[in-house]
Image: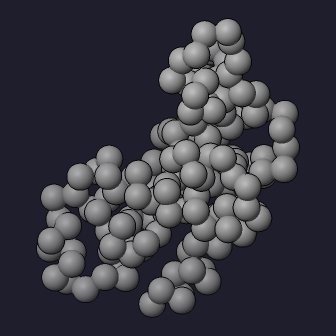
Amino acid sequence: MYSVYYALAESIISYGLSSYGCTFQSYLDQINAIQKRLIKLLVDNKTKRNCRPDYDKLYGTCKILPVQEKVKLFILLEEYNSSEFKTPISHCISTRKVVNKKLYVPKICNYYGSRTRKYLVPKILNDLPDDVRNNTFTKPVFKKKVIVSLLDSFVAKKN
């Protein structure tokens, strides 16, 4: 069943996320609802009963990224080699953000600004753990580490 899901559903869901992934949340919620229905078909009845109060736990059980987290993954992978949006915070006072090598996130004035790469790339990278953010490894290793990190953070938020 997992092979069928990855071959048919996951490929179709992932196909357009790089272009329409930064759209309104209501559109992504529709795709997320379809993805949840498909994931429910993958697990047995006992697991469904255990996750009935919150079906978002099924993502961690099946090790499948939800749509919102896939959008973050695609944005990071597209901007992997680019340093255009990765400006480190630098000022003369030693603060936690400087010590932790956080990136500068520009201020936004409207909803459109929160969907631009200029805002999203540093915001997503700052939310990742330090070992993943300070990437000195190849793109496939980076992808695996980001997937694990995004899935862990999503499951932790839901618990």
Residue 103 sits in which quadrant? Answer: top right
- Specify the quadrant that holds the N terminus: bottom left
- Residue 78, percent from left and from top: 78, 52
- Residue 56, percent from left and from top: 31, 59
Figure check: 102 above or below 131 = above
- Residue 87, percent from left and from top: 76, 28
Q: Residue at x 36, y 67 (%)?
A: 60
State the colouring used for the structure image: one colour
In the foreground, 120 or 130: 130
User: Could you tell me if residue 112 is visible in this image?
Assistant: no
In the foreground, 152 or 103: 103
Q: Is residue 5 left or right of residue 22?
A: left
Figure check: 52 above or below 69 = below
Q: Is residue 37 left or right of residue 76?
A: left
Q: Residue at x 45, y 65 (%)?
A: 35
Residue 141 sits in which quadrant? Answer: bottom right
